[in-house]
């Protein structure tokens, strides 16, 4: 007999968990929405116990990280922890009482994670998680990630992403970009975009480069795939440039940026591209 904790991943983009959401502002019981750089927000996680005994005293740790695709321990900052008693077959919405203030430097475009620990699980997650541990949500039901930003972009804007190599090995990856797909209705509502619909055709251009000036180059010199070498124990940045020209009011398009090593997807970052007429807000 054992407990088994579950914070659901997104599907097919596992970094788009519907079980993690943000409430901007000073009231943690307010409406979910998009975090605002420099202003307080609260994180919630929906945690289930699919095991056959209660998971009493479950600890849920909440983290944020600079915009990245693969996130490892050491590159993420813990916001705080919350505790919950989750019965067998039950679930609970859990609030991190420590407010989170998204970085102004990143314009609020950060990644968030939730990790559930309980010794009644067999085997339990390492506690504490060791340095360099790959959160790798697909491998752990107890870990989920929300790497998702809402962007309104009628101009070509570069968004930075960080790639980190482990301490003992160089990293060779390919960063790829994809446009398309639908977003879980629960996530649209959590972002304050309830009622938005998928654009009827592809209206977004996207490319990736090693520097922020890539968006100034001619389009034929830009790429949607980029090979990256990162020396061990270091980090490097890439820039994703997104431009949308034809989106109508209450339409959205998804852009996914993936970090790949061979056939394995190490992580991803997604952007919901929308257009609001002047004076409107999400």
Image (tube, rainbow, N blue to C red):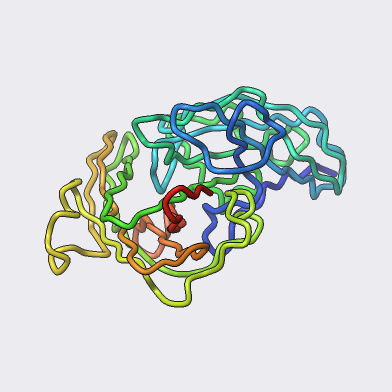
* Picture residue at 81% right of the left edge, 36% below the top: 55
Q: How many labels does the image show?
A: 0
In the displayed structure image, the side of residue 62 where residue 246 appears, left or right: left
Q: Residue 5 at what x, y percent from top left?
A: 73, 44
In the depicted structure, whether residue 113 falls above or below residue 178: above
In the displayed structure image, the side of residue 155 where residue 4 appears, left or right: right
Please state which of residues 206 and 79 is positioned toward the viewer in this rendering: 206
In the displayed structure image, the side of residue 180 where residue 25 appears, left or right: right
Residue located farthest toward the bottom when viewing the structure as drawn: 201
| Residue 78 visible in the snapshot | no
Q: Residue 47 at what x, y percent from top left?
A: 73, 43
> Which corner quadrant of the image does residue 215 belong to?
bottom left
Q: Residue 278 at what x, y percent from top left?
A: 42, 51
Q: Residue 202 at what x, y percent from top left?
A: 39, 73
Please state which of residues 49 and 189 is positioned toward the viewer in this rendering: 189
In the displayed structure image, the side of residue 99 where residue 264 appears, left or right: left
In the depicted structure, whether residue 182 falls above or below residue 275: below
Image quadrant in which the N terminus is located? top right
In the depicted structure, whether residue 192 falls above or below residue 81: below
Please state which of residues 135 and 108 is positioned toward the viewer in this rendering: 108
| Residue 178 visible in the snapshot | yes
> Which corner quadrant of the image does residue 84 belong to?
top right
Residue located farthest toward the front when viewing the structure as drawn: 279
* Picture residue at 36% right of the left edge, 36% below the top: 106
């Amino acid at each position: 007999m054992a407990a088994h904790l579950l914070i659901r991943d997104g599907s097919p983009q596992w970094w788009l968990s519907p079980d993690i959401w943000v409430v901007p502002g000073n009231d943690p019981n307010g409406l979910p929405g998009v975090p605002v750089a420099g202003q307080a927000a609260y994180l919630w996680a929906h945690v289930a116990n699919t095991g056959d005994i209660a998971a009493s005293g479950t600890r849920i740790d909440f983290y944020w990280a600079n915009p990245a695709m693969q996130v490892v321990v050491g590159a993420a900052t813990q916001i705080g922890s919350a505790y919950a008693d989750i019965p067998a077959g039950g679930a609970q919405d859990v609030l991190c009482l420590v407010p989170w203030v998204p970085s102004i430097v990143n314009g609020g475009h950060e990644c968030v994670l939730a990790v559930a620990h309980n010794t009644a699980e067999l085997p339990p997650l390492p506690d504490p998680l060791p340095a360099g541990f790959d959160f790798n949500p697909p491998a752990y039901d107890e870990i989920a990630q929300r790497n998702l930003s809402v962007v309104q972009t009628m101009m070509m804007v570069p968004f930075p992403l960080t790639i980190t190599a482990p301490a003992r090995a160089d990293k060779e990856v390919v960063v790829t970009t994809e446009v398309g797909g639908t977003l879980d209705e629960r996530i649209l509502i959590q972002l304050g975009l309830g009622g938005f619909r998928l654009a009827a055709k592809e209206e977004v251009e996207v490319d990736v480069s090693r520097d922020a000036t890539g968006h100034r180059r001619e389009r034929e010199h830009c790429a949607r795939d980029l090979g990256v070498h990162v020396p061990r124990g270091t980090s490097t940045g890439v820039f994703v440039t997104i431009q949308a020209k034809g989106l109508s009011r209450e339409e959205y398009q998804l852009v996914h940026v993936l970090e790949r090593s061979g056939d394995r997807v190490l992580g991803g970052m997604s952007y919901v591209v929308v257009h609001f007429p002047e004076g409107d807000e999400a």
